[in-house]
Amino acid sequence: MSPIRILVCDDQALIRSSLALILGTDEALAVVGTAADGQEAVAAALDLHPDVVLMDIQMPVLDGVRATAQITSATNAKVVVLTTFDRDDYLFAAIDAGASGFLLKNTEPEMIIQAVHAAAGGQALLSPEVTLRIIQRGTAASAPGTSAAPTAALAPDDRRVLDELTNREREVLTRLASGLSNAEIAAALHVSEATVKTHLSNVLAKAGVRDRVQAVVFAYRVGLIPSMEA
């Protein structure tokens, strides 16, 4: 099999080289290019056709959020954002721009490699801190003990999608948004992982989202996960 092609984007040369070294320890991965700002990242993505882009958020010329939006709209590359969490607004803007994964810059090397494999396989890997931020945003507008988005308050499109989901698809989506892996969902529902993947594919198609991260955002938006403030 051909190696997973990776583009590394960060304005710090030391981080770019460190990431390249980390990724180079896995024979299934190949760093095909690097970029020092968002504009370079977009140009490199269009030229090199990477499978996965590791994207810093705060960069000169063009920030990682806008670069992510341009890359995901013009290519099939999956973007995994590396963040220091000093700007949550950037994080959530990157979600809306189509990023497929989020990691802290101090993440263990093994987790970075795992995230690249997950993104290339159409899945996503979120650090626990990122998942917590998503949960907090999804429940911030709710009163204590209530769902993130009461059904009566749903936008028409969200209500339509929610109505189209089968009970089992809702179960799978709810457990996904709670942070469970495919294997853990399968064990909890007493089905095979293949069945879970089928349900998730159906959810993505019905919701019109590109990956698991977007599905998690949708789950919180429509209130499938209750508030954690009770």
Image: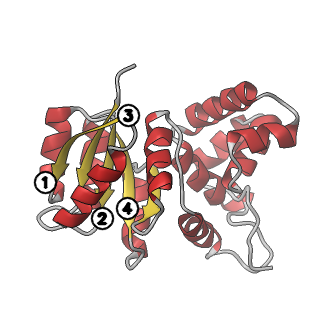
- Give the amino acid type for the residue marked by disc 2 in the picture: Ile
Earlier residue among tags 4 and 2? 2
Figure disc tally: 4
Badge 4: residue crowd in 10 Å (few <14, some 14–19, many ≥20): many
**Residue topped by disc 4:** 82
- Give the amino acid type for the residue marked by disc 3 in the picture: Glu
Mark 1 vs 3: CB contact within 8 A: no
* Secondary structure under the numbered disc 1 in the rendered image: helix
Q: Residue at x 65, y 41 (%)?
A: 160
* Secondary structure under the numbered disc 4 in the rendered image: strand
Q: CA distance from mark 4 to mark 2?
A: 7 Å
Residue 57, numbered label: 2
Counting from the top left corner in percent of width and height, residue 202 is at: 64, 29
Q: Nearer the viewer, residue 228 or 182?
A: 182
Earlier residue among tags 3 and 2? 3
Q: CA distance from mark 4 to mark 1?
A: 17 Å
Q: Is residue 154 left or right of residue 89?
A: right
**Residue topped by disc 3:** 27
Residue 39, numbered label: 1
Q: Nearer the viewer, residue 79 or 73?
A: 79
Q: Is residue 135 visible?
A: yes
